[in-house]
Image (spheres, rainbow, N blue to C red):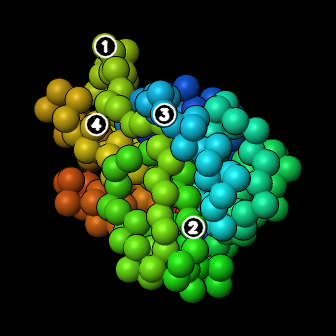
Amino acid sequence: MPHASTPGELDGRVIVITRPAGTASAFARQVRARGGVPLLLPGLALRSGDDGAQTVLREALRRDDLLLFTSPAAVRFAAALAPLRTRATVLAVGQGTAAALRRHGLAVQAPTRQQDSEGLLDLPALHDVQGRGVALVGAPGGRGLLQQRLVDGGARLREVWVYRRTAPRLDRRHVEAVRQLRPNARVLLSSAQALANLHEGLPPDAWTRLRNAVAVASSERLEAAAREAGFRHVRRAASAMPADLLAAAR
């Protein structure tokens, strides 16, 4: 597993952060502290869920046996709807999500190695879900792997969509910055939907310049998506955590 980066290791490289609009400022500070130049290029925008999300969330907190949070954004949007107090077993898809939950005083279980849906499903708490109430807290979309495996295992699944992902608004500054990228730039990828949005939203010449850079993918699935999108140089990080992505970006 890669080691965490230390100051200066990024050696002035441009590090393209594709995380949702408004969520990457702390990540950008880490890039600067390690000697890189951050470029914020959001692949997603996050919006509140529908009007019924609060009611569904409150029911899940009161009644379900297990609560599965799929991202730090899921924690943030859920906490804006209701206090995160529950007697349920709380699970997180990765360590970033787990840290967000702990800040709300929750005991949480999360995978440490494979920080994705497969890693979450390997946790002992999800080995036998027959007849148990399981709430999946996040946003619609994605592969549906969690939902399918939980339903196949006999869980009483409740989907709690506290936010939704939409395409970002890329302006001229974003496009011109991408057009200036050099091949040694690193493009950090942790969402297949964000990658698809950038492909669709950037002009063809800017998209070509982006995929001529080095992609740093947060998982095997993202690595495959990056190669399919045309990136010739792809590295795989240990997880979507900033430290792991930046370690792979060296």
Label 3, secondary structure: give it.
loop
4 or 1: tag closer to the N-terminus: 1
Residue 219 appears at what percent x and percent y? 44, 66
Q: Which residue lies furthest to the right in this view?
A: 105
How far apart, in angstroms, are the residues tagged by discs 3 and 2?
19 Å
3 or 2: tag closer to the N-terminus: 3
Residue 35 vertical position relative to residue 68 in the rendered view, above or below: above
Say which residue appears at 49% left-offset and 68% top-offset: 156
Quarter of the image with the N terminus in it: bottom right
Badge 3 amino acid: Gly
Q: Mark 2 points at which residue?
A: 133
4 or 3: tag closer to the N-terminus: 3
Badge 1 amino acid: Arg
- Location of residue 96 by image quarter: bottom right
Residue 52 is marked as 3
Residue 190 appears at what percent x and percent y? 45, 52
Residue 180 is marked as none
How far apart, in angstroms, are the residues tagged by discs 1 and 3?
37 Å
Mark 1 or mark 2, whichever is nearer to me: 2
Q: Name the residue under label 4.
A: 198
Whether residue 84 appears in this view of the structure is yes
Residue 172 is marked as 1
Residue 132 appears at what percent x and percent y? 58, 74
Badge 2 amino acid: Gly
Say which residue appears at 71% left-offset and 57% top-offset: 98
Badge 4 amino acid: Leu
How far apart, in angstroms, are the residues tagged by discs 4 and 1?
14 Å
Q: Are marks 1 and 3 in contact (CB under 8 Å)?
A: no
Mark 4, Cα crowd under 10 Å, few <14 / some 14-19 / many 20+, is many
Label 4, secondary structure: give it.
helix
Say which residue appears at 29% left-offset and 66% top-offset: 224
